[in-house]
Amino acid sequence: MTELNTLKISEARDALRKGEVTSVELTEACLAAIDGADALGAFVHKTPEIALERAKAADARGYDGQPDLNGIPLGIKDLFCTEGVPSQAASRILQGFKPEYESTVSAQLRSAGAVMLGKLNMDEFAMGSSNETSCYGNAVNPWKGENGAELTPGGSSGGSASAVAADLCLGATGTDTGGSIRQPAAFTGITGLKPTYGRCSRWGIVAFASSLDQAGPMARDVRDCAIMMSAMAGHDPKDSTSADLPVPDFEAALTGDIRGKVIGIPKEYRMDGMPEEIETLWTEGAEMLKDAGAELRDISLPHTKYALPAYYVIAPAEASSNLARYDGVRFGHRAKLSQGDGITEMYEKTRAEGFGAEVKRRVMVGTYVLSAGFYDAYYNRARKVRTLIKRDFDEVYASGVDAILTPATPSAAFELGKEVSDPVEMYLNDIFTVTVNLAGLPGIAVPTGMSGTGLPLGLQLIGRPWEEADLLNCAYTLERAAGFVSKPAKWW
């Protein structure tokens, strides 16, 4: 049989049900792979005892009539609070924090029988596009660049992407505030789904920007994302933004039949200076969908050019508000105080020591745009632009378009350390993804080709709100047509 840790979730589920393998065997294979992959920096809190205990429980339950994820080993991004296990959001300020509760999403995965292998690396508080702002150090892409250069796995869900691409786990949770599931998925040759805002509960997930954050699955293919999504989604009364809507059987929607569907191609996504290989990939992807029976339609999303500046006003504003709770009083790190220091000094010293440079930058930007003299000039204006961006999408979908095809990223994965010195250059990595968060829409990144230097490239499909099932089926069709099967050569 294939090495167990390389199985897809759907393959492992079927093997478990046939009695060809046990969850303990699957879990042990993943734990061995994790122990041999420290060079990737993907797993930052390993939980082998919990994993084996849950695997044994899954085997004891048996697999007849059990949920699809029963006995399946998964990784959990460090942003999800997990009971009794460090949950630091990759920040020094949460050092030593072990929650007494479980996030709704990880609790739902647990009740579906999934096995938690450990916590995954990420950008600090999910702020970053390259996984270089983590207090644990960089997560590294299992794909190597030219001359063996180490590459970014993308961010903020870089550890999740790296772990899935390197076969350390069968799937992983991610969160997406401006592209943090889709961009790392594209950089590592895996599939990542950002659901409609409100489809998955945010309760127990450390907040970055509350009106943009959304949890989603990262896995080897579209079917695996659909299986994970069925367990992760659902209404949660503890989250006021959680939608009280039935969760469809996402896997059953994967028919591969998209005849008569209308796929929009937005002209605004043809950026100046976009690499030719991205342009070619996009054209080829559109042709694949056309060959499958879809109709291609040129569309316009005129306010796209304002998306990045609007996002980088709204997200830091919400972050500065959310991160005010980290003050050294109740949990996490507290700075050592000198004689005569008061509460103000404690706040200042704790935050200076606990927050990294990128988090401090965004907190300062956010505090500035929310300040009395600038609230209307920046924050309120950005909110109005956000409304216009959402209206663009609403009008396109109202005209009969079923999904929109765009590039997932403006380039293949870049070298670690290359762009981190220029924050604006780094922010441009989110150019194709932030509109989806601002409009609250579902989006999925699917690996569809290789760059000239042998690195994976992905395309993004954007769906109608709450129609993830339809979106997954379009992505499934694209995935089958593209036939992407490349894997990184093992060097770690």
Image (cartoon, rainbow, N blue to C red):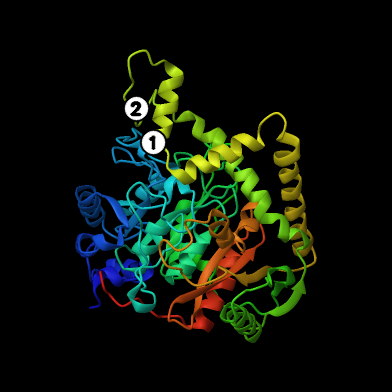
- Is 447 positioned to the left or the right of 349 in the image? right
Q: Residue reaching furthest bottom?
A: 291
How far apart are the two marked residues, 2 and 1, measured between alpha carbons?
Answer: 8 Å
Q: Which residue is mark 2?
A: 335
Residue at point 70% right, 78% down? 260
Give coordinates of residue 200: x percent, y percent: 52, 48
Residue at point 67% right, 69% down? 404
- Is 123 positioned to the left or the right of 366 in the image? left
Give coordinates of residue 325: x percent, y percent: 48, 29
Of 170 and 352, nearer the camera is: 352
Label 2 is placed on what type of residue? Ala
Q: Are marks 2 and 1 in contact (CB under 8 Å)?
A: yes
Task: Label 1, secondary structure: give it.
Answer: helix
Of 307 and 337, nearer the camera is: 337
How crowded is the residue under tag 2: few (<14 C-alpha within 10 Å), some, or many (20+)?
A: some
Give coordinates of residue 153: x percent, y percent: 41, 64
Q: Can you say whether 191 is above or below 326 in the image?
A: below
Of 445 and 15, nearer the camera is: 445
- Is 115 positioned to the left or the right of 460 in the image? left
Q: Residue reaching furthest top?
A: 340
Q: Quadrant of residue 395?
A: bottom right
Q: Which residue is mark 1?
A: 354
Can residue 241 be seen here? The reply is no
| Quadrant (top left/top right/bottom left/bottom right) for the C terminus | bottom left
Label 1 is placed on what type of residue? Gly
N-term mark: 2 or 1 = 2
Task: Label 2, secondary structure: give it.
Answer: loop
Q: Can you say whether 489 is above or below 388 in the image?
A: below
Give coordinates of residue 117: x percent, y percent: 28, 54
